[in-house]
Image (cartoon, helix red, strand yellow):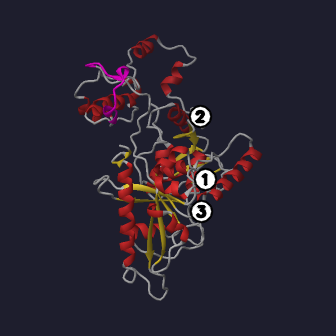
C-alpha cells in the first residue's frame, strides 16, 4: 500500500510551530551538508520524522491562478522581516543565479498582501487563507503529492511485491483466481465521488454539513447550497428598490446566483502611515502606540514595512477582534484595496498623497479618517487646520529620556483610546459590519 506523504505546506507550518526549522541541501541525502544558497539547494529536509521534498514541489498556495513552488514559499518565509524593496532585490538576485545554473528554475515574487497572508498562516496567527487551496482539492495538490512521493520528478517510487509479480510473468492460474477475487480499495476521493453533490439540498443540510467538513475534501458545492438557505434569513439591500422580475426566485427553487463569488473571509481594514522622517509615528513605533497605549520615539533601523494588529470594536463586532494592516506606502495596492482604507496618519505634508487614489486632501479625508499626531501644546500646521473636520488632531507629551515608562506617560492611553473611538465611529458610518464593508 502506498504511504501517504504529508502536505509540504502543512509540514512547514508544523515545523515552524515546533521551532524545528527545516534545512536546505543539494541532495536528497539527509546526511549531506546543508546549504543556505537556494540557487544551489535542491531539497528541503525536515526532521522528526525525516521527510525530504524537492524545492520544485508545487504547493497549495496559489498566486495568479498558479501554484507556488516550495522554493518560493521558503524564500518568502526567510525574508519575512525585510522590507519590500530588499525582498524584491533578493528575489531578482536569486533568479539570476538560478538562470545561470539551469535556466529553468525561478523563485516567484509574491505581492505584499500574498506575502503577508502566507507569513500569517505559517506563523499560526491565522487558521485560513484565501490563497491556500484545501487539502486534496485541485491539480496542484495532486501534483505536489506525486513529486513529494517520487512518482513524478523525485525519487522513484518502490513498486509493491504484488505489482512486481504480475508484470511480465506468467501467473499461476490458482494465484490469478485469488487476484480476481480481490476487492479494490478506494481513497476518499473515489468513495465520496470527488466534489460531486453527495445528496440533494435538504432543509437539514447544516446538520450534516459540519460532519462532511471533517474530511479534507473540496465541498465548495455544499457551501454554495448552504449559502442559499442562509441568505433567505438575511435582509437584502436590494429589497428596498424595485425588484427585477428576472431575478425573483420561484417557490421551491434556490435563488439565481448573481455570478459574484462569495468570500468567506472578512477583509482586513487598512491604516496608512506617513513615510515622512518628521512623523512622530512610523512603522517602528506605531504598534506599541496603538496596541499598548505607549509612545516611544521611532527608530531608524531596518524594520518590516507591513504590520498587523488586532483590536476589538464592539459596535462593529462585539465577539471577534478586527485585524488591521498597517503600511506606509500604497505602491503595492490593488484597486479594491482603497475601499478598505479606514484611516490615514499624516504630518500635513501633501507630497504624502502623490501615489494615492485621492490626491486632493479634502477629497481623501471624505473617504478615510485623517489623523494628525503632534506634540501637546504646539500649534497645528496651517495645512491640517485647512482640511477641516475630516482630520482628527491629537497631541502627545514630548518625549523625555529622563522620564520613561508607562507610569510617566499615562496620557498616551487617553490619546490612543480617542483615536480608536473615532476610527470605530467612522467605520460604522461607512457601513462596516461583522463580515466587512457593507455586510
| Tag in front: 1 or 2 | 1
Residue 72 point in image, percent of width and height: 60, 47
Q: Quadrant of residue 70?
A: top right
Left or right of 164, for residue 269: left
The residue that appears at 74% across and 42% down in the rendered structure is: 102
Q: Can residue 168 be seen in this view?
A: yes
Residue 395 is one of the magenta-drawn residues: no
Q: How far apart are marks 3 and 2 (CA)?
A: 62 Å
Residue 342 point in image, percent of width and height: 45, 55
Residue 1 point in image, percent of width and height: 44, 30
Mark sitting on residue 331: 1
| Range covered by the magenta-colored residues | 237-252
* Front one among 193 and 5: 193
- Is residue 80 depicted above or below 165 in this figure? below
What kind of element bears circle 3? helix
What kind of element bears circle 2? loop
Identify residue for label 3.
350
The residue that appears at 41% across and 45% down in the rendered structure is: 128
Amino acid at each position: 500500500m502506498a504511504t501517504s506523504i504529508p502536505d509540504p505546506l502543512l509540514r512547514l507550518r508544523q515545523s515552524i510551530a515546533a521551532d524545528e526549522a527545516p534545512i536546505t541541501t543539494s541532495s536528497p541525502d539527509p546526511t549531506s551538508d546543508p546549504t543556505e544558497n537556494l540557487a544551489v539547494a535542491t531539497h528541503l529536509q525536515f526532521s522528526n520524522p525525516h521527510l525530504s521534498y524537492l524545492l520544485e514541489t508545487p504547493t497549495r498556495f496559489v498566486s495568479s491562478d498558479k501554484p507556488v513552488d516550495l522554493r518560493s514559499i521558503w524564500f518568502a518565509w526567510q525574508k519575512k522581516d525585510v522590507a519590500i524593496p530588499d525582498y524584491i532585490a533578493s528575489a531578482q538576485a536569486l533568479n539570476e543565479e538560478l538562470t545561470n545554473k539551469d535556466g529553468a528554475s525561478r523563485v516567484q515574487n509574491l505581492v505584499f498582501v500574498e506575502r503577508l497572508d502566507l507569513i500569517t498562516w505559517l506563523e499560526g496567527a491565522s487558521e485560513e487563507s484565501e490563497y491556500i487551496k484545501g487539502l486534496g482539492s485541485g491539480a496542484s495538490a495532486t501534483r505536489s503529492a506525486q513529486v513529494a512521493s517520487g512518482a513524478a520528478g523525485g525519487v522513484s517510487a518502490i513498486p509493491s511485491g504484488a505489482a512486481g509479480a504480475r508484470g511480465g510473468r506468467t501467473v499461476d492460474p490458482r494465484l490469478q483466481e485469488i487476484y480476481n477475487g480481490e476487492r479494490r480499495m478506494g481513497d476518499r476521493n473515489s468513495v465520496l465521488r470527488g466534489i460531486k453533490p453527495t445528496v440533494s439540498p435538504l432543509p437539514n443540510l447544516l446538520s450534516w454539513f459540519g460532519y462532511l467538513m471533517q474530511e479534507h475534501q473540496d465541498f465548495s458545492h455544499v457551501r454554495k447550497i448552504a449559502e442559499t438557505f442562509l441568505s433567505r434569513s438575511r435582509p437584502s439591500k436590494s429589497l428596498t428598490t424595485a425588484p427585477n422580475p428576472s431575478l425573483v426566485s420561484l417557490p421551491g427553487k434556490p435563488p439565481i446566483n448573481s455570478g459574484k463569488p462569495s468570500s468567506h473571509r472578512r477583509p482586513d481594514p487598512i491604516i496608512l502611515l506617513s513615510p515622512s522622517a518628521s512623523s512622530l509615528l512610523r512603522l517602528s513605533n506605531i504598534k506599541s502606540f496603538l496596541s499598548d497605549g505607549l509612545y516611544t520615539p521611532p527608530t531608524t533601523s531596518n524594520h518590516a514595512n507591513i504590520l498587523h494588529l488586532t483590536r476589538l470594536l464592539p459596535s462593529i463586532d462585539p465577539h471577534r477582534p478586527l485585524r488591521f494592516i498597517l503600511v506606509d506606502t500604497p505602491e503595492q495596492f490593488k484597486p479594491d484595496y482603497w475601499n478598505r482604507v479606514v484611516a490615514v496618519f499624516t504630518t500635513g505634508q501633501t507630497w504624502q498623497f502623490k501615489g494615492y487614489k485621492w490626491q486632493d486632501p479634502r477629497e481623501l479625508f471624505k473617504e478615510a479618517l485623517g489623523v494628525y499626531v503632534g506634540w501637546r501644546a504646539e500649534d497645528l500646521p496651517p495645512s491640517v487646520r485647512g482640511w477641516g473636520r475630516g482630520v482628527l488632531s491629537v497631541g502627545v507629551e514630548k518625549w523625555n529620556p529622563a522620564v520613561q515608562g508607562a507610569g510617566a506617560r499615562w496620557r498616551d492611553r487617553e490619546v490612543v483610546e480617542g483615536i480608536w473611538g473615532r476610527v470605530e465611529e467612522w467605520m460604522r458610518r461607512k457601513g462596516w459590519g461583522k463580515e466587512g464593508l457593507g455586510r
